[in-house]
Each structure stands twice: as structure tokens, then as C-alpha cells.
Image: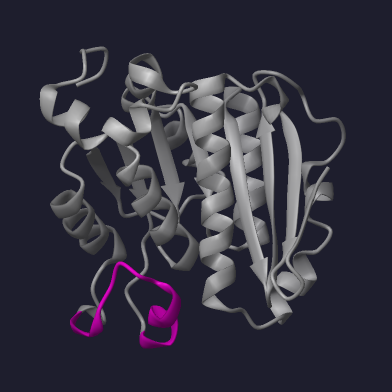
Amino acid sequence: MNNQILTDPELRRFKDQISLSYIGVNGQQRIRNFRIAVIGAGGMGSAVLQLLSSMGIGYLGIIDFRLVEESSMQRQTLFGGNDLGKLKTILSKERLQSNFPFVNYEIINLEITNENAERIFSEYDLIVDSTNEPYMSSITLEACKKLLIPALIGSVYATNGYITVIDFKQQEKEGSLNEIFESSAEIISEGKISIAYHFAAVLICNEIINYITLNNSDLHTKRIMFDLSNYKIITH
């Protein structure tokens, strides 16, 4: 599928997207040839997977080892009541493939660790950590730094959240990467609302599409913070 011209069905499906001046046919081709791994198919991850699939990302890795639980279904839009106790990865692929047949999906039923992260990530152009777990963010960033590939981290707590973006091809982060997560204690202790997960997913996917189509040079270090209770968005 990679490096082939867009098919007629693809041109019809993505007509509105292609009509945007900053995307066009060439941009859609780049989107189709891009390989992204998403860690976590939960609240944030399920939304990221749906959005990336709907925009025509050519290859998506779905990384998760957990089963669907009732307590988390409120924010995980890929799953229904009959899915309790089933693997999120398999269900995600089934639902996504039905709606977005132009995407290649890879199921990875593993927990990402320091031992396997580099091996798994090396097959992809960009990694998204949507687990909302500070320890996983640290593992992701360390592996991406060694591989020199971009990483996007989404974190949500209460009605707030932030997106951290680093492109290690452009810049080496000085000091400990854990300094990025000074709010990790809040993330663990606070309750969360499903809207915040989906808002974070929108920001993540927008950064990805801009990076692919505009080749944005400012992707290397960025944090986008938001507070949905007062409609505040801050980028720094």
C-alpha cells in the first residue's frame, strides 16, 4: 500500500480533505504512507484511532493488553455493552476496519516496557501515548529519543489536560525527560470527564496532520494545555 498512488475510492472518500490547499493530493499521499503506533485503546486512544483512521493514515498500530471494563466504557467510544471482558485491540481493529477500510491495522497485545519499546516503535514514523500514565510516557519518550522519532503524549485530569509534543529528529531534550510531567500527581489523583479525553485526542490528531502535511518545524518541543471549564487553551 505504501508509495502507491491514491486509488479512485480513496480520492472519493477523502475529497473534502484533499480540497484543502495545505493538503491536496500530495498531502493525502503523505498521510496514507505514514505509520503511527497508538499506545492505549482507552478513552483517549479510541478517539485518536478513530480520527486518524477517518483521515486516511495508512498504517496504525494498536497497542494495548487490557480488557474492556464497565467502569471505563463511559469514555471509550469503540466499545459496547457486549464487549466486556474482551481485548481492546481486537475489538478496535474490527470496528475501525469496518468503517475505515483503507487503513492497515496491526494489533499488538503487549504491555510496553523498557525492554520491548524500541523494538516495537522502530517500525513506526511516530508514536502516540494515550495511556494517561506518567510511567508509560517516560518509557515512550526514552525509546523515541533513542530512535529519533516524534512522540506525542496526551494527559487528562478532571476537565483539564495537556498535549506534549517532541520531535527528536529536530531537537534533543536536555536533562531528564521526566521534567515534562510535573503534573503527574494530579493526573493520578483527579477524576476525569470523557469530553476531556476526546478534546485531547482532537489536539493530538491536529498536530499529527499538520506535521505530516505542513512538515511543521516547531513540532520538536511543544506543550498545549487546556481547561474545558473556562475554554482556555495555552501553547508554550
Image-based side of 156 in relation to 179, left or right: left
Q: How many marks?
A: 0
Q: Is residue 206 above or below residue 95?
A: above
Q: Is residue 54 visible?
A: yes
**Residue 136 percent location from the top left of the image:** 59, 54
The question of residue 81 being in magenta is answered with yes
The question of residue 157 being in magenta is answered with no
Image-based side of 194 in relation to 83, left or right: right
Image-based side of 207 in relation to 117, left or right: right
Q: Main secondary structure of the magenta part?
A: helix
Q: Is residue 118 visible?
A: no
Q: Residue at x 71, y 71 (%)?
A: 187
Quarter of the picture holding the N terminus = top left
**Residue 44 percent location from the top left of the image:** 49, 62
Q: Is residue 100 above or below residue 34?
A: below
**Residue 21 percent location from the top left of the image:** 46, 21
Judge by depth and name the residue closer to the eye, 120 or 191: 191
Q: Residue at x 59, y 63 (%)?
A: 132
Q: Residue at x 32, y 76 (%)?
A: 68
Farthest residue to the right: give it.
Answer: 175
Q: Which residues are magenta?
A: 70-82
Q: Residue at x 77, y 73 (%)?
A: 186
**Residue 61 percent location from the top left of the image:** 34, 42
Judge by depth and name the residue closer to the eye, 12 or 80: 12
Quarter of the picture holding the C terminus = top right
Q: State the scheme by which the image is colored.
A: one colour
